[in-house]
Amino acid sequence: MTDATQLAARLDDAVRSGLPIPQLSLETALSLDEAYDVQRAGVDLRRRRGEQVTGVKLGFTSRAKAEQMGVSDVIVGVVTDAMEIVDGGIIDIARGVHPRVEPEVAFRLGESVDPTDPAIDLANAVTDVAPALEVIDSRYRDFRFSLADVVADNTSASAYVIGPWQSIDDARATDGLAARAVELAVDGVTGETGSTEAILGDPMAALPAIQRMAARHGHELPAGAVLLAGAATAALPLQAGTTFTATVAGLGAASLRVAGGNAHE
Ligand code: OOG
Ligand code: MG
């Protein structure tokens, strides 16, 4: 077994047990490229269990998020069908370590794209856009990590909810996607507010970033893939018995009901 496979197995055990582990970087010097190898090995484990990759996600596209977590670089991770929850669906937090939720913007690809092809502009392959919620759940104790740690941990990806899709052309025709108000509400009460501008100045800017990162780190971008552009506000801890709703002005809302007892940490 390679180191990457071993490290990925430790993270995968933490996902499945809900029990946090110490940061890998405390014991193993991990470069960013090695961290992406660990991420890939973890996704391979999921694939072998029958999960299918549904898309990719960007992390730390917003300054509020980067400051919340004390890091400064954009990162990319992978989402699978096992992480997808229908809009208005239920998540059981008893399964998680210390899950948090954040409001996002999601894109959908109408055709498959080779990110390494310099002639391709990923934005031209996007057909739809939607409001979304992402559940992040670091497998590290106290939700603390270095950039390499969080990359190895598949960027804390845990679950996601996509609200109603609408045509990207229609959505952009009315005022573009930048500077749209974003709200994360808890049982209908405003929790966090922000703007889509927090996502690299304009969520459309997430697309070249995804293309660049996917090319560099070997992520695939097939037709139908979901692209999560990153959070527009800081994340809130999931609480059992509550409903979280992300609303993006002009795009609508995505919501998630939280069931279960306490998370593990
Ligand atoms: C890493 C994931 C960051 C985002 O939208 O910025 C992320 C984390 O905060 O644990 O998903
Ligand atoms: Mg996110």
Image (tube, rainbow, N blue to C red):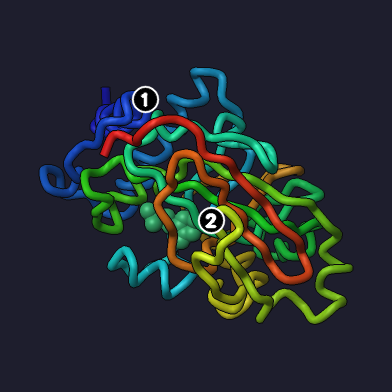
| Residue holding disc 2 | 186
Estimate the x, y position of residue 121 in percent, counting from the top left: 72, 65
Closer to the observer: label 2 or label 1?
Answer: 2
Q: Earlier in the sequence, mark 2 or mark 1?
A: 1
Q: Residue at x 79, y 63 (%)?
A: 124
Badge 1 crowding class, 10 Å Cα cut-off, few under 14, some 14 to 19, many 20 or more, is: few
Left or right of 175, for residue 185: left
Q: Quadrant of the C terminus?
A: top left
Residue 242 in the image, given as x and y percentages of width and height: 52, 45
Some atom of ligand 2 lies within 8 Å of the CB belonging to the residue at label 2: no
Marks counted in the figure total: 2
Name the residue rendered at 40%, 44% in the picture: 99
Image spot of residue 144 (x, y percent): 24, 54
Give SS at disc 1.
helix
Q: Could you say which is closer to the camera, residue 241 or residue 236? A: 241
Q: In the image, 226: left or right of 218?
A: right
* Along the viewing direction, whichever of 41 and 226 lies nearer the viewer: 226
Q: What amino acid is found at the position of numbered circle 1 in the picture?
A: Arg
User: From what the image shows, is residue 12 above or below residue 186?
Assistant: above
> In this rendering, does residue 146 appear at all?
yes
Kindly identify the residue that appears in the image at 68 percent across and 76 percent down: 180
Q: Please name the residue that numbered disc 1 is placed on.
A: 16
Which of the two residues, 6 or 188, is positioned nearer the viewer here? Answer: 188
Q: Is residue 211 visible?
A: no
